[in-house]
Every structure is written in structure tokens, then in C-alpha cells.
Image (spheres, rainbow, N blue to C red):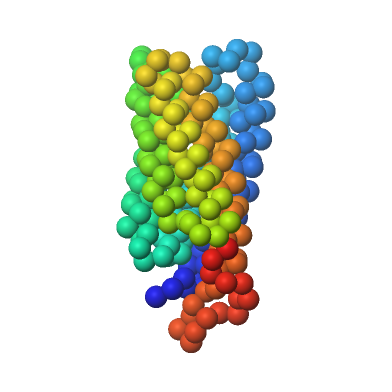
Amino acid sequence: MGFSLSARRLGISAAAGIVLLGLGYAVTLIVGLLSLQSPQQPIGGWYFLILELLILLVAPLAVVLMVAVHAWAPPEAKAYSLTALVFMGVLSGLTCSVHFVILTVGRQIASADLTRSALFLSFKWPSVAYALDIVAWDVFFGLAMLFAAQAFSGGRLATLIRILMITSGVLALAGLSGVVVGDMQLRMIGVIGYAAMFPVVALLLAILFMRTEAVTSSGPADVTLPREA
């Protein structure tokens, strides 16, 4: 069937959105961390609210981006790209549910000061919400990147995307070491994988999609560069 014009536009739009929101997330996270008196403190106030909203926007865009990756992938790699899409969908469902509950129910419970609410609805370890978000980003995001990487090979740009996807996925999975040893500072390894490297991957995917010849019902679209970058 080829890479359709609608898939091309969808992929470029989703990638651009992830890049912009990723920059906003990185800036907010850095400023929020610098505002803390102790590294053990969780980010709070407006910084926390902005981070939560950005995650609620980024996660669905990541699914849309994987849809475009699956459409772009060559036939022999579509099993890998479809697996990546499923994992990214699980990630989005999990993390959006967790962060929406935290922003709504969590804030009301915190203001009511109900006993043991932090064990369920906080991002201070250990808590149920924190554990679910770790599964979403460290496990399912990591697996999505590793499988999606298998769809890219051949040209220099595609090879670079493959390398960065694998690196991003490995770093995300490595963030699980924080759970194993009980030190959440080690989770920053995973944060580098999905908060720092994923926007770079999205930017490169946008460039790749722009260089890809799209196919319409009447034939190839007016794109001068070949499919392989």
C-alpha cells in the first residue's frame, strides 16, 4: 500500500507536537528540580500541575506517532512496528489514567488529608500510582522503542533513528533499577530515555517522514526525496 499522505501528515504533526511538549517538559522539570530544597522532595505546586498536563498531552501523541511508524514500516518489519504500537497504546492508557486520577481525585484526597492516601495517590515511593507509572514508562515505553527500532535500517537517518530508539528503550528499562534497589534517584536513568531522548527521536522521525515519498490514490505525492533516508 505504501506510506499514505494522511499517515505522513499525521506522523509529522505528532512528532512536532512531541518535540514542542518535550521541550516544555524538560524546562519545567529542570526548574522544578532546582526549586527543591532537598533532592528527596517531590516536585509540587504549579511545576507539578504543568508536568501532569504535559504528560496527558504527550502520551496520546506518542500513540499517533507509532501509528505513523507502523504505516511507514516496510512489510517485513510491520510485525515489529505493530507490537510497538500496542505497547505504546498500553503506556498511554496507563499513564493518562494515573495522571488524570492524580490531578482530580488525588488533589481532593490530599486536601481532605485522608489517612494513607499517599500510599495510593502520590508520586512518593512507595505508592500504587507511582508503581503504575513506572510500569507504563520504564517497561512499556522501553519495549515500544526496542520493537519500533526494528523497522528502521538502510539509510543513515533511519540507522540513526534505530540507534537512538534502542538507546532510549534500554535507558527506560534501566530505570527499573530504582525499584529493585529502592532508590528512586536511579529512575532518572529512565527519565533520560523517555524525557530527553524521545523528543530527539520524534524530531528525526519528522525529518524522515518529510523526506518520504507519500502515495495517494492517484500515485506518488509531490515529494522529491526518495523513501529511504
Residue 108 lies left or right of residue 208; in this view the side is left
Q: How many numbered discs sit on the rendered protein?
A: 0
Q: Return the residue found at the far bottom.
A: 218
Residue 214 picture location, percent across and down = 52, 74
**Is there any visible trace of residue 111 in the rendered image?**
no
Looking at the rendering, in which quadrant would you find the N terminus?
A: bottom left
Q: Could you say where residue 193 lies in the image, as x and y percent from the top left?
A: 52, 36
User: What residue is shown at x 52% (from left), y 26% (from top)?
Assistant: 188
Tell me which residue sits at (55%, 16%) in the image: 41
| Residue 212 appearing in the image | yes
Classify 15 as above or below 192.
below
User: Can you give x and y, in whole percent of width and height, for residue 49 in the image?
Assistant: 55, 33
Residue 28 found in image quarter: top right
* Relative vertical location of residue 155 with respect to residue 116 in this rendering, above or below: below
Q: Give the x, y percent position of residue 24.
A: 64, 41
Q: For the C terminus, give its image quadrant.
A: bottom right
Residue at 60% across / 12% down in the picture?
38
User: In the figure, is residue 22 to the left or right of 113?
Assistant: right
Quadrant of res 98: top left
Most extreme residue toward the front is: 154
Is 206 in front, or is 107?
A: 206
- 9 or 46, nearer to the observer: 9
Q: Answer with the quarter of the image where residue 226 lies.
A: bottom right
Residue drawn 56% across the image and 24% down it: 44
